[in-house]
Amino acid sequence: MPGEILEVRVKEGDKVNQKDALFVLSAMKMEMNIEAPVAGTVKTIYLGKGEKVSAGDLIIEIESFSN
């Protein structure tokens, strides 16, 4: 969904559980918490606060604990 990143709630190297909040996205006049789809370690953060995003953009890469 196209929008703007309002807040990034993790940093590279953080360990996250499935459904932990990763960032807040503002889209269509709504704010949404975007959650981790898997448990793992935040490997790379590609976009930050204030940046515009489009559907399909890679924002945060998580290395799954099962890898």
Image (cartoon, rainbow, N blue to C red):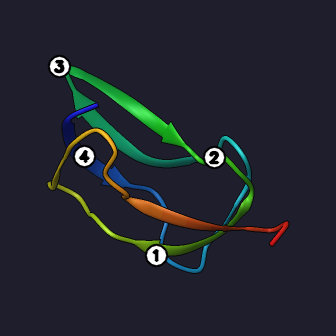
Q: Earlier in the sequence, mark 3 or mark 2?
A: 2
Which residue is drawn at the image coordinates 25% and 48% (left, top)?
Answer: 5
**Relative image position of residue 19 (x, y in whole percent):** 66, 41
The residue pinned by badge 4 equals 6
Q: Could you say which quadrant of the image residue 49 lies in? A: bottom left
Q: CA distance from mark 1 to mark 4?
A: 18 Å
Q: Could you say which quadrant of the image residue 43 lies in? A: bottom right
Q: Is residue 3 left or right of residue 33?
A: left
Q: Hey, what amino acid is under mark 1?
A: Thr
> In the rendered view of the protein, which quadrant contains the N terminus?
top left
Tell me the SS state at disc 4: strand
Q: Are marks 4 and 2 in contact (CB under 8 Å)?
A: no
Which residue is drawn at the image coordinates 21% and 34% (left, top)?
Answer: 2
Disc 1 versus disc 3: nearer the observer = 1
Residue 58 vs 15, above or below: the answer is: above
Q: Is residue 38 left or right of residue 46?
A: right
Q: Earlier in the sequence, mark 2 or mark 1?
A: 2
The residue pinned by badge 1 equals 44
Q: CA distance from mark 1 to mark 3?
A: 28 Å
Which residue is drawn at the image coordinates 17% and 19% (left, top)?
Answer: 29
The residue pinned by badge 2 equals 20
Q: Hey, what amino acid is under mark 2?
A: Asp
Instruction: In this rendered view, identify the residue nearer to me: 12 or 1.
Output: 1
**Relative image position of residue 47 (x, y in whole percent):** 27, 64
Q: Earlier in the sequence, mark 1 or mark 4?
A: 4
Q: Hey, what amino acid is under mark 4?
A: Leu
